[in-house]
Image (cartoon, rainbow, N blue to C red):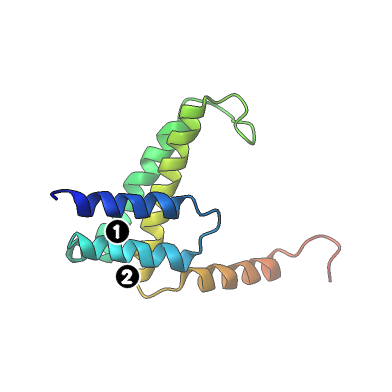
Amino acid sequence: MEGEGCADETDQVVAQAKETHVSLKDLSRKLEEFAKARDWEQYHSPRNLLLAMVAEVGELSEIFQWRGEVARGLPNWEESDKEHLAEELSDVLLYLIRLADVCGIDLGEAATKKLVKNAIKYPAPGLP
């Protein structure tokens, strides 16, 4: 039946989206599979991924552009605005993960090392 493969893939994505905890490595693997299935790897050069991510950061910025300061938790936001924000944040994250992978960077490891460097550089008051 035509389109059945697409429905199966959609069902898998929906089931996976319901997972409450997902690792960077899981997302990385899913992104690689997604790109391979569509023959998009040819377009996933570091430069192209970076430019796509920057475009998504621009879309994310537009959400906040005219709102002034925003309270934590976004208490005065409509649910549809929060959903839009979540989508744009996800776009940025997914491009960042894909960029790191294409560059051969383990993003989880790099981020952990960076947290250690920041803790040394900016020690909490009262800690030795």
Badge 1 amino acid = Leu
Q: Are marks 1 and 2 in contact (CB under 8 Å)?
A: yes
Q: In 3D space, how far apart are the residues under numbered discs 1 and 2 (Cα atoms)? A: 9 Å
Assign a secondary structure to mark 1: helix
91 or 30, which is in the foreground? 30
Mark 1 is surrounded, within 10 Å at the Cα level, by few (under 14), some (14 to 19) or many (20 or more) other residues, namely many
- Horizontal side of 72 relative to 79 (left or right) equals right
- Horizontal side of 32 relative to 26 (left or right) equals left
Per the rendering, the mark at residue 102 is 2
Quadrant location of residue 69? top right
First along the sequence among labels 1 and 2: 1
How many numbered badges does the structure rendering display? 2
Q: Position of residue 75 (x, y in %)?
A: 62, 28
Residue at 63% over, 71% down = 117
Badge 2 amino acid = Val
Q: Position of residue 127 (x, y in %)?
A: 84, 67
Per the rendering, the mark at residue 49 is 1
Q: Position of residue 16 (x, y in %)?
A: 43, 55
- Horizontal side of 60 relative to 82 (left or right) equals left
Image quadrant containing the C terminus: bottom right
Per the rendering, the mark at residue 12 is none
Above or below for 77 versus 84: above
Residue at 43% over, 48% down = 90
Above or below for 125 versus 18: below
Above or below for 50 versus 63: below
81 or 26, which is in the foreground? 26
